[in-house]
């Protein structure tokens, strides 16, 4: 439903004022802050139209109006002016002086950045590696004892000890690793297992057994790493009156962080989209509370989307600041993990 310029200007002014102070906005206040030379009576007529269309609502205790989820949606999609935020500070905090940090540390830093800059909760869905591997190596520890090193697509390194019936030499271990990397890199160990029987008949039996053992151990190593999320700043939400004003709201808030399944579902949906997504409570069934919004963006490794990050806060949040924080952090996290 298209709004004319006058209605858009008044709706934008109302949402911005309500986000700033949390109080219903009256016609006289809108007359002062909108920049339009309209009488309070004219503004009341426009507000009545906006209310009839479902963009604003009138609380029983006040003559002023507040935005509805539908009003917030129009605001963030069409009326918002996003702030410019420098990438320099975020980049230095995400990757302080070292390119050798483990991916888990970089992801934790990203969650902390989102939380500290927004003053709400920051969340990062950790990469879904499944049992896909990027590279394997064999290191001979002693006779019939081999260390299997598995590198996941997100850069994480996992080790497994293999006890073998045969004492493999360095050249054999190199040959086996090269074969697995050249033929199976980028697919799951489960798929590699299915293809091994047909493709390894021309190789020596001992080498076949080694690679089959590596596939089994590698699959176990990666499956042990449960997909999940990193959350930072949950306690910040306890200071948000809109989210913690009553026991029912608090219970929903803690249930969301404790169970995580609903939040993971939302982040997974976001990972299939492009760019920043905004989920507004009361509008999206994925958001557990009407008073809550979640701003998300996908991140990737070497151009492939592997997860989602975002900020969890009240519906009455400063979207013009939170959106670029989420957007830039997603890009910086992608760069850091790709390096």
Image (cartoon, grey):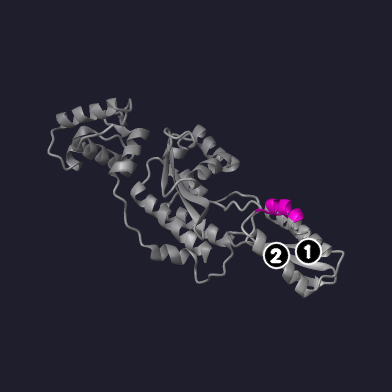
Lower sequence index among marks 1 and 2? 2
Task: Tell me if label 1 and label 2 are in contact, CB under 8 Å.
Answer: yes
In this view, 10 is above or below 307:
above
Q: Quadrant of residue 217?
A: bottom right
Q: Secondary structure at mark 1?
A: loop
Q: CA distance from mark 1 to mark 2?
A: 11 Å
The residue under the point 80% across, 73% down is 169
Question: Which residue corresponds to the image point at 37% horizontal and 34% vertical from the top-left?
Answer: 69
Q: What is the secondary structure assignment of the residue under circle 2?
A: helix
Which residue is nearer to you in this view: 278 or 137? Answer: 137
Q: Which residues are magenta?
A: 188-198
Mark identifier at residue 203: 1
Q: Nearer the viewer, residue 282 or 149?
A: 149
Residue 52 in view here: yes
Say if the magenta span includes residue 197. yes
Q: Is residue 247 found left or right of 176 in the rendered image? A: left
User: Which disc number belongs to residue 179?
Assistant: 2
Furthest-bottom residue in this view: 170
Of 140 and 104, nearer the camera is 140
Considering only vertical position in the picture, is 114 above or below 258? below
From the image, which quarter does the N terminus lie in? top left
Q: Residue 230: where, in percent of width, then height?
A: 56, 52
Residue 337 in the image: state x and y as whole percent: 53, 62
Judged left or right of residue 1, residue 285 is right
Residue drawn at the location 23% of the way across and 38% of the way down: 8
Residue 230 part of the magenta segment: no
Q: Nearer the viewer, residue 274 or 126?
A: 274
- Give the prevailing secondary structure in the magenta stretch: helix
Percent across and percent down for residue 138 are 73, 68
């Amino acid at each position: 439903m298209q709004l004319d310029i006058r209605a858009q200007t008044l709706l934008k002014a109302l949402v911005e004022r309500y986000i700033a102070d949390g109080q219903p906005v009256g016609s006289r206040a809108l007359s002062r802050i909108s920049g339009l030379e309209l009488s309070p009576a004219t503004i009341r007529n426009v507000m009545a139209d906006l209310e009839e269309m479902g963009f604003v609502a009138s609380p029983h205790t006040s003559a002023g109006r507040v935005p509805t989820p539908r009003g917030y949606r129009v605001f963030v999609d069409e009326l918002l002016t996003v702030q410019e935020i420098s990438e320099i500070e975020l980049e230095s905090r995400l990757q302080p002086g070292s390119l050798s940090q483990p991916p888990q540390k970089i992801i934790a830093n990203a969650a902390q950045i989102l939380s500290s800059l927004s003053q709400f909760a920051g969340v990062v869905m950790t990469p879904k590696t499944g049992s896909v591997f990027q590279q394997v190596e064999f290191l001979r520890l002693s006779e019939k004892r081999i260390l299997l090193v598995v590198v996941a697509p997100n850069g994480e390194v996992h080790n497994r000890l293999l006890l073998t019936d045969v004492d493999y030499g360095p050249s054999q271990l190199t040959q086996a690793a090269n074969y697995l990397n050249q033929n199976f890199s980028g697919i799951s160990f489960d798929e590699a297992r299915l293809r091994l029987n047909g493709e390894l008949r021309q190789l020596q039996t001992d080498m076949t057994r080694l690679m089959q053992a590596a596939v089994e151990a590698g699959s176990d190593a990666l499956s042990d790493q449960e997909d999940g999320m990193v959350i930072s700043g949950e306690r910040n939400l306890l200071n948000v009156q809109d989210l913690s004003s009553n026991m029912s709201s608090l219970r929903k808030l803690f249930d969301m962080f404790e169970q995580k399944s609903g939040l993971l579902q939302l982040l997974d949906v976001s990972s299939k989209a492009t760019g920043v997504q905004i989920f507004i409570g009361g509008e999206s069934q994925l958001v557990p509370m009407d008073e809550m919004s979640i701003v998300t963006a996908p991140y990737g490794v070497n151009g492939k989307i592997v997860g989602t990050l975002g900020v969890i806060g009240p519906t009455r949040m400063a979207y013009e600041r939170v959106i670029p924080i989420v957007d830039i952090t997603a890009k910086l996290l992608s760069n850091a993990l790709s390096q």
